[in-house]
Image: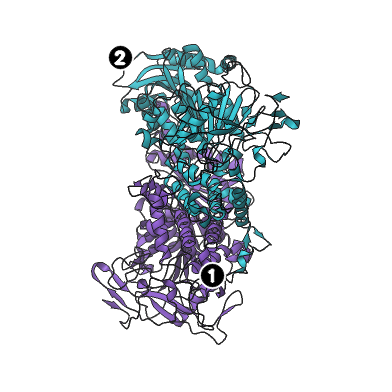
Chain colours: A purple, B cyan
């Protein structure tokens, strides 16, 4: 099975040992062969951008007269040309995102577990492009490229670049390849910054954006690590101010040290412990012979870092490392736009922000800052914090849920999207259907709904299909997050008890809390928050005051159990059970108006009691619509309805 | 006010700029003057150890023919010579722990906030000693000292040292100063390792040990940072294999880089963010002129690190840095002893282990491993995890609770200890007294008790004084931890819900859970754990099945409230309320035998119901003694008693 055309291959980049010997603007053609075991054979292609006479103008005002870009492509471009996925690589990555080069099966791309046939980014559906960044050393123009003006390597004369410059080059590449639309731009770490920048600068081009383990700017700690790494390179005598290419010596010590520092920051402490612990090698290093330290242990972790440093020196250029980390350091959406909200103002794409639990280089708080600002700016955003034990590198390693989530978020998932939704709507469990109908009746068509503890998003889908309601969910379980995203709703992975601080006042028409109030740690706070973020609240809860529960406690002297509260006292999730009267009392005390109340009964006695007006005794479950006193239209709303 | 004798001072070490010019074995005398504002003027003293002809034999078998030690002393040694506190300094610290040198008020000691009159380590009560480590460069013999055999600086010929060597030198110092007992040895970070090593190697000498933010060995991540730092020094051309002293050039770049890496690891990411954020300096660095990067920002955090690196190069010796970090790397209690438990076998001192929440270099798990192993080894140990936002450096900065805890743990706290205890016992609140009496009656004198959720330790003190009971507490609140330590009990700062995994099977005779079962998340698990770690369990709980509660729910349709359960449904901590019958049912299902049960009533009706045998209706609170079926002596124990 062959994608694209098979043609002349001059020099696959994966075989180039000295990376700064490339970047000559050569043209390579695309070769993609699906081999055995679904392996994808691919070649990096290098294309010279068609530039105006003035050249490529950088943000700094400086000009590059020629720019070459190395890229790889996977999967077929469809006729509508709207199935393009652009992947932005991280600091030291390259265009080789998936498959392998030539016959070398070890030359797997850096995200091969994510990109391919049937994978998270499915090359059966999407035309995937990944390109080396400007300033890099893997085929795209960078400090190790030949300056056409002088005929020698740029070196110290290569201008400073920014994330925006990188993105501008990539967009020019896409346009030159005839792609005016990007179904999704995806990046992790530094790639996440590029993805955002593309979505922000080209809002009409980019339909969706996935930003993984990234940030709106580096933290002070990350800046500090970069500062040390950069100064290690600069203080290497071989660096020579950046013009070391002619000397035959490279600043290997400095670059290796930078890489070693980087490597530590990419891993979680736990993953280093489980990978190396305090294991020692039997072999002594030569170094440890000096200074009377011949008894020193040779720890595996140190040897591993040395190996990583050495390997890196053979594949990366020190000046590229400086230029790219400097672009990373300087990237700051707040500094550029004033606030994150104003940065996102012109954004049109929907966004998925993913944080990784054990990432300490781009900690989850930085991702949630982005997601919260997008929410405040009124954008379509989903946020998830993935359990990823491997630290920042988790986006390359802890792949399973991430792949499921990306697959769910992307527009095609192997079935027609619309029909998938209808299928989902039909899946509403029968016992839930009447409640969903009731909730839907309480909600004006076309309004916006926040579903707290939204589960797998079935209610949101039901409301969308039956009431043209736009919705967002909040839930904590990863399976639910993926399901809800699959159904096309926005969702925040958050504990309802953790607060709804990220949501601005009055953002939604309705907030729904279904069978959750008795489960949360701070029911009163949750009610208050509901009515802060939404005009009205819809709450359903089991009624602990039902006659059978009362009698149960009264007569048997044991904690009540029943259909609506089936758990044993010692393992019940209902940590704050309450009765209808308790709820009414609390609403009074809090200045909350109960606009409508449905008392749901399940037996003959229940119905009788309800009809006699004893709802607190007759209802097994209750559904209320509440609002604040200020917003309440009537004194008492529509009152109580019993079934 | 003058401590010690005022005599000739040749050269206060704080004025020595090139640290390797010292270490000549000079004798300095002690000068300590209490100045204005409680400032303590102090001088570092250097003493030559009285060594046998064979010299000082290191663990490696190598010999130092002369060893000088720099130390400082504070507070008076009492007549019994049993008030000695020895403080072990961290990696780059020195003997100057408190007060100031000469007239220079900026020369405050590195732990001046902790050590002094009325402070955590109170020099009004204790004779405090701190000494520079072997291998250091602040007055104690190290690689920058003169080798008496050659008359030139040791340099590369200085032998490898271990933590045990360092401790042996310090113990020799103490013995030479006439101190055969150490009331407490205290250290943070690398100092914590030394403190442990002293307590382990000199069990009869060391009465107590405080180990803060430390570990039984470095983690893989910490080893990795050390590996990078060490290789930065070794790859500095000025290092010259360790013999750079004659050259006039020092490996400043390498040492500075090592210090910068270290500095990042000492701070939490949050504290770096709040200290520097992404602030920039207006001033451009010279360095940034090169390589076309003239537009680069000069981040404050980078400038700060540069400054720290530079400052460090002026006060520390590169070879000392190598030797001490190597000793740190090699320290591994598990490797030496097989397991931590066997490492602690011969330990006689009681131990306080303190972890810091935001410490990622010596993370809390490493401290808790030590504490758990001490517990398993049957030692007297308390463990606390202090809220410390400043990272590993927190033990120098986040001082308030740490000082309170150390003060409480040390034997004298300004009052006679015994009388303090009696005073505390008298403080038992009257309403608690009858319950304490009941609990005491259930416990055989001289037995061991684990008090889960022990509060301020009043019950433990009551049981100790009235039943010769040895006890340990578990609680989560820091104020309680300090109170319990003050009262002389061991305590673990832990959430009862977090499990009792750290406690071995059958460790205690009794586990007490007072008014806590209904508050925990997993009551059944807590009961199981109680009876795993103790032979018997004593549980008190409010009875939700009391007649008034039942009637309240039944008649008013509202969740019960009353004396024993005073909270509103929405803010009650009682998240798993239950009745006496519920409890009995659960015990049956779990194979737990109720050996004795006291039903506590509070009114006439209660008492009447109880007497009629309706304990589940009549008791407002209940006290039970439980055990496993296997351990139960009778079929049904002593049965139910009502008051």
Residue B296 visible in the displayed image: no
In the image, is A565 to the left or to the right of B39?
left
Mark 1 = which residue?
A242
Q: CA distance from mark 2 to mark 1?
A: 86 Å
- Quarter of the image where one finds residue B293: bottom right
Question: Residue A348: where, in percent of width, then height?
Answer: 53, 70
Please determine whether, in this image, residue A177 is positioned above or below residue A461. Answer: below
Question: Residue B580: where, in percent of width, then height?
Answer: 41, 24
Same chain check for tags 2 and 1: no
Please determine whether, in this image, residue B208 is positioned above or below residue B165. Answer: above
- What element does badge 1 sit on? helix
- What element does badge 2 sit on? loop
Q: Chain of mark 1?
A: A
Please determine whether, in this image, residue A169 is positioned above or below residue B540. Answer: below
- Quarter of the image where one finds residue A127: bottom left
Mark 2 = which residue?
B634
**Looking at the image, which residue sits at the far bottom?**
A53
Question: Residue A586: where, in percent of width, then height?
Answer: 57, 40
Please tell me which residue lies in front, A14 or B227. Answer: B227
In the image, is B460 to the left or to the right of A569?
right
Q: Chain of mark 2?
A: B
Question: Residue B43: where, in percent of width, then height?
Answer: 66, 33
Q: Quadrant of the N terminus of chain B?
A: top right
Q: Residue at x 59, y 74 (%)?
A: A59
Badge 1: residue crowd in 10 Å (few <14, some 14–19, many ≥20):
many
Q: Say which of marks 2 and 1 sits in front.
A: 1
Badge 2: residue crowd in 10 Å (few <14, some 14–19, many ≥20):
few
Please tell me which residue lies in front, B452 or A312. Answer: A312
């Amino acid at each position: 099975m062959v994608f694209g055309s098979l043609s002349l291959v001059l020099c696959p980049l994966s075989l180039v040992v000295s990376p700064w010997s490339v970047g000559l603007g050569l043209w390579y053609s695309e070769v993609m062969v699906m081999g055995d075991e679904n392996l994808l054979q691919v070649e990096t292609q290098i294309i010279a951008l068609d530039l105006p006479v003035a050249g490529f103008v950088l943000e700094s005002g400086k000009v590059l007269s020629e720019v070459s870009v190395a890229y790889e492509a996977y999967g077929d471009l469809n006729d509508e040309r709207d199935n393009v996925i652009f992947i932005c690589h991280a600091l030291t990555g390259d265009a080789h995102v998936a498959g392998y080069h030539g016959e070398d099966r070890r030359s797997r791309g850096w995200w091969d577990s994510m990109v391919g046939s049937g994978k998270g980014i499915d090359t059966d559906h999407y035309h995937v492009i990944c390109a080396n960044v400007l300033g890099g050393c893997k085929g795209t123009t960078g400090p190790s490229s030949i300056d056409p003006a002088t005929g020698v390597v740029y070196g110290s004369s290569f201008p400073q670049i920014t994330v925006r410059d990188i993105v501008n080059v990539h967009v020019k590449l896409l346009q030159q390849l005839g792609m005016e639309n990007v179904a999704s731009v995806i990046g992790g770490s530094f790639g996440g910054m590029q993805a955002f920048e593309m979505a922000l600068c080209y809002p009409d081009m980019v339909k969706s954006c996935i930003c993984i383990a990234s940030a709106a700017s580096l933290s002070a700690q990350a800046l500090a690590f970069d500062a040390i790494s950069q100064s290690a390179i600069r203080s290497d005598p071989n660096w020579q101010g950046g013009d070391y290419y002619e000397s035959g010596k490279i600043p290997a010590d400095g670059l290796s040290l930078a890489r070693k520092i980087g490597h530590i920051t990419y891993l979680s402490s736990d993953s280093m412990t489980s990978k190396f612990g305090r294991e020692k090698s039997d072999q002594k290093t030569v170094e440890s012979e000096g200074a009377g330290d011949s008894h020193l242990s040779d720890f595996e972790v140190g040897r591993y870092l040395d190996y990583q440093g050495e390997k890196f020196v053979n594949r990366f250029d020190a000046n590229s490392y400086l230029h790219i980390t400097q672009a990373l350091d300087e990237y700051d959406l707040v500094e550029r736009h004033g606030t994150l909200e104003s940065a996102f103002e012109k954004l049109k794409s929907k966004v998925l922000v993913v944080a990784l639990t054990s990432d300490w280089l781009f900690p989850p708080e930085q991702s949630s800052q982005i997601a919260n600002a997008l929410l405040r700016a009124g954008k379509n955003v989903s946020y998830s914090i993935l359990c990823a034990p491997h630290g920042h590198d988790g986006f390359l390693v802890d792949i399973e849920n991430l792949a499921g989530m990306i697959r769910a978020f992307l527009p095609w998932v192997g079935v027609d999207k619309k029909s998938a939704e209808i299928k989902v709507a039909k899946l509403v469990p029968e016992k839930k259907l009447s409640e969903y109908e009731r909730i839907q009746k309480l909600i004006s068509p076309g309004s916006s709904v926040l579903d707290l503890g939204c589960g797998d998003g079935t209610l949101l889908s039901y409301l969308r299909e039956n009431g043209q309601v736009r919705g967002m969910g909040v839930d904590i379980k990863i399976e639910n997050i993926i399901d809800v995203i699959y159904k096309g709703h926005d969702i925040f992975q958050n504990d309802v008890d953790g607060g709804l601080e990220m949501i601005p006042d009055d953002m939604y028409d309705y907030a729904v809390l279904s069978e959750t109030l008795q489960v949360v740690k701070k029911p009163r706070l949750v009610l208050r928050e509901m009515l802060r973020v939404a005009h009205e609240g819809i709450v359903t809860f089991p009624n602990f005051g039902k006659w059978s529960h009362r009698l149960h406690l009264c007569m048997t002297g044991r904690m009540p159990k029943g259909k609506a509260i089936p758990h044993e006292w010692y393992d019940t999730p209902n940590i704050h059970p309450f009765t209808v009267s308790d709820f009414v009392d609390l609403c009074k005390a809090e200045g909350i108006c109960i606009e409508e109340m449905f008392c749901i009964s399940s037996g003959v006695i229940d119905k009788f009691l309800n009809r006699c007006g004893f709802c607190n005794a007759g209802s097994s479950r209750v559904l209320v619509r509440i609002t604040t006193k200020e917003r309440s239209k009537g004194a008492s709303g529509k009152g109580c309805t019993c079934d």
